[in-house]
Structure formats: structure tokens, C-alpha cells
Amino acid sequence: MGSVAVLMNPTAGRGRHAHLRDQVARVLGADAEVLAVRTTEEAEAACRAAVAGGARAVISVGGDGTLHRAVQAVAGTGVPLGIVPAGTGNDVAACLGVPADPRAALESAAAALRSGQTRDFDLARLERDGVVRWSVGVTGLGFDTLVNELANRMRFPRGPRRYDVAIVLELARMRPRRYRITVDGVAEELDAVLVAVGNTARYGGGMRICPAADPTDGLLDLVLAGPVSRFTLMRIKPQVYAGTHVAHPAVRQLRGRVMTVECDGITSYADGEQSLPLPVTFTAVPGALRVLG
């Protein structure tokens, strides 16, 4: 049996879960190997090396960004992923039914390791020019992407409020962009201010941007908002937390197995992490992620 590779982000959740390092050793035992990494690139490379070296599981201790790096290594391999939500939003963990308390999630992952209990979920496969990335949650492709880029650069305020402030700041320069969207072979061109592709429902610390997305149905959900005023977008925004924004006449939902999104000047953000510049083709891959528990 191989070791259990543990990817930890000590700064996730503003560092309030740094004590989990001691818990990992106690709960997972001698098989646990905490990966020595300093950057996101090193984190992803270390997870890939662990899987290639025969790790029997990878445990992600952090937020959605940490989880995203681990997913790149385990996608499609059958190597199970343990999720310990210790970040700020923890949207993916919530959508996959992982305990919200990180210590409870760690205990659950350890118990699943002993019993062999796992669950399979779909992933979104992102591809451009032969480069492949994977997303377990939501990929932003418009106004939300610009907000994400700004929020990631901000140091204050901390926590989910960063996104609220970034939204207000980005509204000042918001403009519709021309998109070409193809869903299962059917293409259309349209103007939009917000586009998101979801394998799960949530991003940004609880916003249910793709409320109907189900990571077990073999499909992806695309939600877009057409040209709207800043005032209208701000009126719609609070509804996103409940997922009721999709009832607004400016909002559309599309669903399919393969989607291509094209737009000039936009880089996709998958699970809150910078990914591929558009155009990007998204493919739903059933059962590509195996989760402990």
C-alpha cells in the first residue's frame, strides 16, 4: 500500500486552521506524508509526483484553490481525494457534501481510507490548443472573472467580503462583451456581462451561480447574464446566494455535455484559480473524481 499524500495550505482561511498539521499526523497515522511545497506550481507538481509514485490517496487541506491543485493530479486516475475544507469559502466541499468542520472532515476521510468507502463525481475538462485543465466547481468567464482577479490581488477586507468590494469596484468599468457559445454543437453569438460554467452550483463564498448544476448528472450548466445596467446587476447580485437570479429575464441557463466559449480578452478562472484564456472547450467527464467518504 502506498502512502497518503497530504497537500496543506497553511495560509488558507487566514491561517486559522494551521493547527491541522498536528491533527493530520494523529488522525492519518504514519502513512501520511505532508508534501513540502511553497507555491501553487510546486503544490500541483508534488501531487502529480505522489500519484505517479503510487500514493493510495491524496488529502487536500485548504480551500478551493488547494483542492483545485490536487484535482489536477487525481483526475481520471481512480486515486481517491480526501477533502478537508480549511479555506474561506469552501464552496466545492459544501457542494460535495463534505463536513464543514475541518476536523470532522479529516476524521471522515481517515475512516473512509480504512473502510475503502468512496464516491464518484463528474469533472469539467477544460481544453485549449491541447492544454488540459480540470475543474470540479465553477469556472468564471466574464464579469465574475474580472472580480476574481481583483479580489485575489486585494489584501483588505479579508474573507468573503473581498468579493463584495471587488464587485463594486469592477462595476465602474463593466461593459458587455461579445461571446460565441457552442453547446453540444449548437452555436450562437450574444452579448453578455457574466458567463459561468458549473459542474457544481457555488462559487465566491456561497453564491449559487449555477443553482441547477449537479456533479453526478454527466452534464455542465452554463449561466449567463445579457447586457444589463450596473444598477440591474447589483439588484440581481443578492439573489445569487439563493440561486433565484435565474428567474430574471436577462439571465439564461444552458446545459450540455460539451461547450465551447469564445471571447476576446477573457481568461477563465476555474475553482477560483486562473486557468486557460478563451476560447476554451468544456467537456463533462462522468466519474472522473473519486472522493473519500
Image: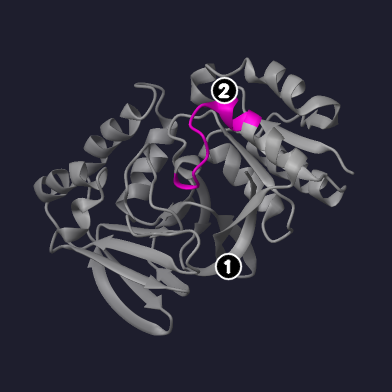
The residue carrying mark 2 is 11
- For the C terminus, give its image quadrant: top right
Amino acid tagged 2: Thr
Q: Quick check: 241 above or below 217?
A: above
Q: CA distance from mark 2 to mark 1?
A: 31 Å
Which contiguous range is marked in magenta?
A: 95-107
**Residue highlighted by disc 1:** 285
Q: Is residue 122 shown left or right of residue 221?
A: right
Work out which quarter of the rendered image holds the N terminus and state it.
Answer: top right
Element marked by disc 1: strand
Q: Nearer the viewer, mark 2 or mark 1?
A: 1
Q: Residue 62 location in percent, x, y?
A: 57, 31
> Considering depth in this image, is 278 or 206 the residue closer to the camera?
206
Q: Residue furthest bottom?
A: 185
Say which element carries label 2: loop
Can residue 172 be seen at all in this image of the molecule? no
Residue at image position (46%, 69%) is 219
Please determine whether, in this image, residue 154 is positioned above or below residue 246. above
